[in-house]
Amino acid sequence: MNADRSYAELCEGIIRLLRDERKRRKLSKYVVEQRAGVSQQMVGYVERGLRKPSLETALRMAEGVGVDLADIIKQARKATPKRNKK
């Protein structure tokens, strides 16, 4: 289903942007863990695509990185190719 693929690509984009921003700010997974209350292991699993984060986990990770998740979602939506609805 195209919608499923679009949402999967959007989710991957959101996580990629969070990871890139964490690295750009030179924050370790440990720092994100301490700021957000999400384990280093979970941060790693999410960043590598081994786990899909809940909304709460994504919000916590964004807070730990110091960004607004809504802004990250907007950026990811702009970068995700639109698919024709059928």
Image (spheres, rainbow, N blue to C red):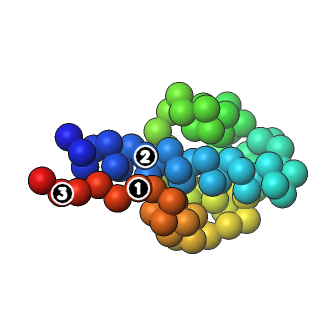
How far apart are labels 1 and 3 at the CA level? 13 Å
- Give the farthest residue toward the left: 86
Q: Check whether the beta carbons of the residues at disc 1 and disc 3 lie within 8 A of each other.
A: no
Q: Secondary structure at mark 2?
A: helix
Q: Check whether the beta carbons of the residues at disc 1 and disc 2 lie within 8 A of each other.
A: yes
Q: Is residue 79 left or right of residue 6?
A: right
Q: Position of residue 60 (x, y in %)?
A: 61, 56
Q: Residue at x 80, y 49 (%)?
A: 23
Q: Position of residue 4 (x, y in %)?
A: 27, 44
How far apart are labels 3 and 2 at the CA level? 16 Å
Residue beneath disc 1: 81
Single out the mark in the foreground, 3 or 2.
Answer: 3
Q: Residue at x 12, y 53 (%)?
A: 86
Q: Secondary structure at mark 1?
A: loop
Residue beneath disc 3: 85
Q: Is residue 55 left or right of residue 82?
A: right
- Give the farthest residue toward the top: 50
Q: Residue at x 72, y 36 (%)?
A: 40
Q: Is residue 54 left or right of residue 33?
A: left
Q: What is the crowding at mark 3: few (fewer than 14 residues within 10 Å), some, or many (at least 20)?
A: few
Quick one: label 3 or label 2, which is nearer the N terminus? Answer: 2
Q: Secondary structure at mark 3?
A: loop
Residue beneath disc 2: 9
Q: Which mark is residue 13?
A: none
Quadrant for residue 17, please give it: bottom right
